[in-house]
Amino acid sequence: MTATGEIRPLQRSVRIGRVSAIWRPRAVAVAASAVLLTLAISILALGIGDFIMTPDRVVATLLGQGNASEQLIVLTVRLPRILTGIAAGIALAVAGAIMQTTARNALASPDLLGVTAGASAGAVAVITLGGTASASGFLREVGVPTAAMLGALLATVLVLVITGRTGLSGIQPLLVGIGVSAFFTGAVSWFLISAPIKDAARANVWLTGSLNQRSWPEFWPIALSILVAAVVLVPLAHRLDSFQLGNDIARSTGVPVARTAIVLIGISVLLTAVSAAAVGPLGFVALMAPHVIRMASGTTRASLFGAAAVGAFVVVASDLVARTVLAPIQLPAGAVIAIIGGPFLVWLLISQRRKTSL
Amino acid sequence: MTLHAGGTGVLRSAPARGLLLLGLLAALVVCIAVGFAVGSRDLSLSAVWAVLAGGGDPEARAILLDQRIPRTLIAVVGGAALAVAGVVIQGHTRNPLADPGLLGVTAGASLFVVIAIAFFGITAPAGFLWFAFAGAALAATIVTVLGRVAGGRRDSSPATLVLAGTAISAVLAAISGIILLLSSSTLDVYRFWTVGSLSGNHDLSQLAPAFVFIGIGLVIAIGHGSTLDALSLGDDTARSLGRNLGRSRIVGLTAVTLLSGGAVALCGSIGFVGLIAPHLVRLLVGPGHRWLLPFSTLVGGMLVLAADTIGRIIILPAEMPVGVVLAMVGAPAFLAILVQTRRARA
């Protein structure tokens, strides 16, 4: 406010028809660079492997100008795997951003809702009890993802039924989720120590989360649920800002808190379950991506779009590192995510401090 | 991040709480007696008593002195340490989702145990003790220093500490994960350590350092109660109440490191106890740390001991490791209690 009493808004806004938003140049720049980085790393990843292609050949092949072998390698072998990684990264990061905002807790992640543990128990049960050590690809293709999906469903139903009896106040839903997760995690440990070491090792690979041998059948379910989530989230996303201020303030600004929270958490569960069934748990993405985008863009809550871009980048980059660094051994992507994402988070924490204290 | 959303607990008056504390102590003694007597070879209480008095037949002596007494002690002390560590870390971060592993303690201990198995060829649990403790201490130091560096000049804010702990834990766990993926013989030993099995013979003199660390940690933590109460009002209020935040933070984090490092060294990684025991006790006696800390000590010790005893007899002749029992029996019990207290309040 200036001396003449003229009111000047502190932040500029953009308005399109009835929709308006605050114009945050830094947030937009950060999100745009995350998208560009994801594109760049994807093109790089499409070119790297047993048969190495330069980025310009990759782009040419994507545009339909490659020769037959280039087409086979890029479009049939590597593209579906990388798209699956992008989709899983988006799904997990959006689920994480929703959880952190609605629970208003930096440690909240969709893993606490029991879905991931349920999916893990289902998958590990099939791997260790199914007698699949010698099994053909059929059980891997059908058995494990289906079992994971069933486990996730079972966990979701349990959490819903029990939360219905404890109420939604405070951190009750998260405590219920923690209890249900602990039960299924215990089951996973039990399967792991009862199984022959060969099966336990295979289960351990699944539990790490991997894009190895993932293709279109894994991509489409995640992509579809992202589409569903987007349709639901676009009209709801602005309410997340009210949630950030606490349930009471959110309610007083006219947000139907309980109903919105249930829809938002439902979306989070859907995205996490589908992604876990397709590629395994891929820990840390959901927790890290929202914090990274929040700190990098200097906002109080993570934008869903920005978090999605960071999530996609981290998963694709991790997969690239995981399959090249110890070649010919292909590590699962999940093994590398924290090694790439963790130091990045720490660096952001420290560099943010310098900015605020100067 | 409301820590104390649950009201002031079922028991409001000090005499009621004192009585319950005594009752819990008596229950713990009963649990210990049952823990001595029950197992794949049941002993009568009189046989147990004979051994404790210095006599008894040789077989009973061997079972009790080499196995059941040490593992009972380990379970009670380890459980108490984890629960108290959980109270302290939840109080310091003002985050009800914080568990004793938050400072990287569990991940650090696990990584060093994995290294001990993979590169030093150690397979006996007794050999893991110093590795586990060194890993726990190293990780907690890194997280605390990072929290201070990132949190500003005077104090590491809880939010920064939480994020630093999460990030470092994830990195350490990822390194363990890669070693385990590359070496299935390491996984073969590690998978039994990580579920916290207490079976087998124990030499208490080898485990003595862990007991000492936990003892020091418990003393610090119990004396830390009023500081935790002040911190629960927020950092600024705590400061205006005359607390030196930087020093309180160091004291609290040292206690957490000693307690959870010692517990992980003793029992393997069974973090669930540290997360839920404080919540259970808060349902009973509310958020004040004067009651929360002693109650958590007893409840934590009893939970792990009960889980270990159940694990010995639930799938005879085999044993179910204490970590698995805690999760598969403890979690449903925890959920039932959540539902019941809601009903009691309604």
Image (cartoon, helix red, strand yellow):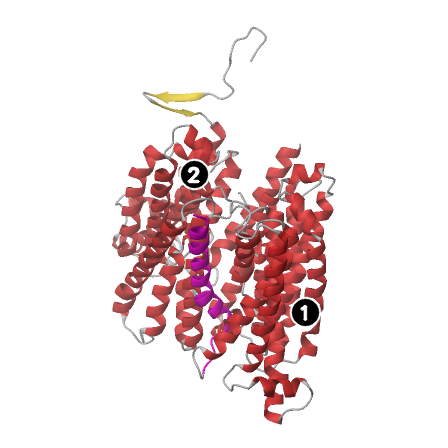
Residue at image location 61% in from the left, 71% down from the top: B266
* SS for dot 1: helix
> What amino acid type is highlighted by mark number 2?
Gly
Callout 2 environment at 10 Å: few (<14), some (14 to 19), or many (20+)? many
Judging depth in this view, the residue of A351 and B66 nearest the camera is: B66
Q: Residue at x 29, y 74 (%)?
A: A135
Q: Position of residue B129 (x, y in %)?
A: 64, 71
Q: Residue at x 70, y 39 (%)?
A: B239
In x, y percent, where is residue B242?
A: 74, 40
Q: Nearer the viewer, mark 2 or mark 1?
A: 1
| Residue type, numbered disc 1 | Ala
**Magenta segment boundaries in residue numbering:** B318-346
**Can marks 2 and 1 be said to lie on one chain?**
no
Task: Name which residue lies at 53% across and 71% down.
Answer: B306
The crowding category of the residue bearing disc 1, from other C-alpha atoms within 10 Å (few below 14, some 14 to 19, many at least 20), is many
Real-space CA distance between mark 2 and mark 1, rounded to the nearest whole angstrom: 46 Å
Mark 2–mark 1 CB contact (< 8 Å): no
Q: Chain of mark 2?
A: A
Report the front residue among A289 and B87.
Answer: B87
Q: Residue furthest bottom?
A: B57
Can residue A40 be seen from the camera position used here? no
Quarter of the image with the N terminus of chain A is: top right
Q: Quadrant of residue A252?
A: top left
Q: Chain of mark 1?
A: B
Q: Of the numbered discs in the image, which one, if any, rests on residue A306? A: 2
Q: Which residue is mark 1?
A: B210
Circle 2: element type: helix
- Image position, residue A342 (x, y; %): 54, 51
Q: Within the magenta stretch, is there residue B340? A: yes
Question: Eyeballing the image, is A297 above or below B106?
Answer: above
